[in-house]
Image: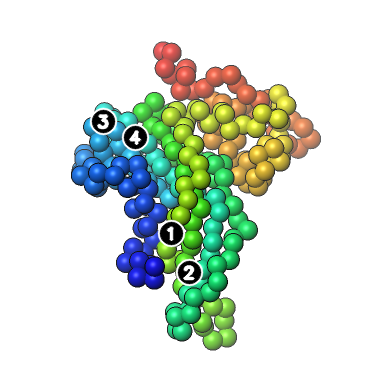
């Protein structure tokens, strides 16, 4: 295990998912339209992106011109953390991180490409993983230890959520919400932070899934529209 940390340098999750979704390496790292696709098989392209969807701004319009593009987003549902002392080589016992990822994490990334979302050839796949995260720890005198991530090794694919159409995100609005709700209502119902709830709502407003219907004190009230920009575009 220690050997893989130095070799792969943060690429293990990417490699595992690439092999999971397409075992045949002949379809990996395919040069297409002057770019490199993680997976390209026939008219289907898969890009595995663990952060910063904004880095795909060139690929999205190029790849969806003639093909279907699925962005795979790995989300650590549960994470074991193991620290490696770079001086002594001592490896700590695994510690369970209190931070747990959910499908709503994808909205933070989608927000960065919100102007590109209304594309019928663009799809998303959120992959919830249980993994072990290795961290290098370097002791620094008179300062806090320097910690940097070495690698993440997945051991379970817990769930895969498909958004074949970005507007499918409407199913992620908790059923318990009333007709009108605030971002705080959304956060409590989905059991996520206020920041994640606000980001989800912003993306859903961009997609035409939600709209502002009024105010409750100083908070905006939101309501489902019953439609979407993409559906309107398809009907024209």
Q: CA distance from mark 3 to mark 1?
A: 30 Å
Task: Give coordinates of residue 202: x percent, y percent.
Answer: 57, 36
Q: Nearer the viewer, residue 224 or 138?
A: 138
- Tell me where residue 7 sits by quadrant: bottom left
Task: Return the residue nearer the eye: 122 or 114.
Answer: 122
| CA distance separating discs 4 and 3 | 9 Å
- Residue 61, can we see it? no
Could you say whether the residue bearing mark 4 is in a helix, strand or loop?
strand
The furthest residue to the right:
217
Q: What residue is drawn where x is 36% and y is 28%?
A: 121
Earlier residue among tags 1 and 4: 4
**Residue 21: in sight, yes or no?**
yes
For label 4, the residue is: 69
Residue 184 vs residue 31: left or right? right
Residues at marks 2 and 4, CA–CA distance in whole angstroms: 33 Å
Mark 3 or mark 1, earlier in chain:
3
The percent coordinates of residue 178 (x first, y second) are 72, 26
- Depth check: give the residue in front, 18 or 222: 18
| Residue linked to disc 3 | 43
**Quadrant including the C terminus:** top left
- The mark that comes first in sequence, 1 or 2, is 2
């Amino acid at each position: 295990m220690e050997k893989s940390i130095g070799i792969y340098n943060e690429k293990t999750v990417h490699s595992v998912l690439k092999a999971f979704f397409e075992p045949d390496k002949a379809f990996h790292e395919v040069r297409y339209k002057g770019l490199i696709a993680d997976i390209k098989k026939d008219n289907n392209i898969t890009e595995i992106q663990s952060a910063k969807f904004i880095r795909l701004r060139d690929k999205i319009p190029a790849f969806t011109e003639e093909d279907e593009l699925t962005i795979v987003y790995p989300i650590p549902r549960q994470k074991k953390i193991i620290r490696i002392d770079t001086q002594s080589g001592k490896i700590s016992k695994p510690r369970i991180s209190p931070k747990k990822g959910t499908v709503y994490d994808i909205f933070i990334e989608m927000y960065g490409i919100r102007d590109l979302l209304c594309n019928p050839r663009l799809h998303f796949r959120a992959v919830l993983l249980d993994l072990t995260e290795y961290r290098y720890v370097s002791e620094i005198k008179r300062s806090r230890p320097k910690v940097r991530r070495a690698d993440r090794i997945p051991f379970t694919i817990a769930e895969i959520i498909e958004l074949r159409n970005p507007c499918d995100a409407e199913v992620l609005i908790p059923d318990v919400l009333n007709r009108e709700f605030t971002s705080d209502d959304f956060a409590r119902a989905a059991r996520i932070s206020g920041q994640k709830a606000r980001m989800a709502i912003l993306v859903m407003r961009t997609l035409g899934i939600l709209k502002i219907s009024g105010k409750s004190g100083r908070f905006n009230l939101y309501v489902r529209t019953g439609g979407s920009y993409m559906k309107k575009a398809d009907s024209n």
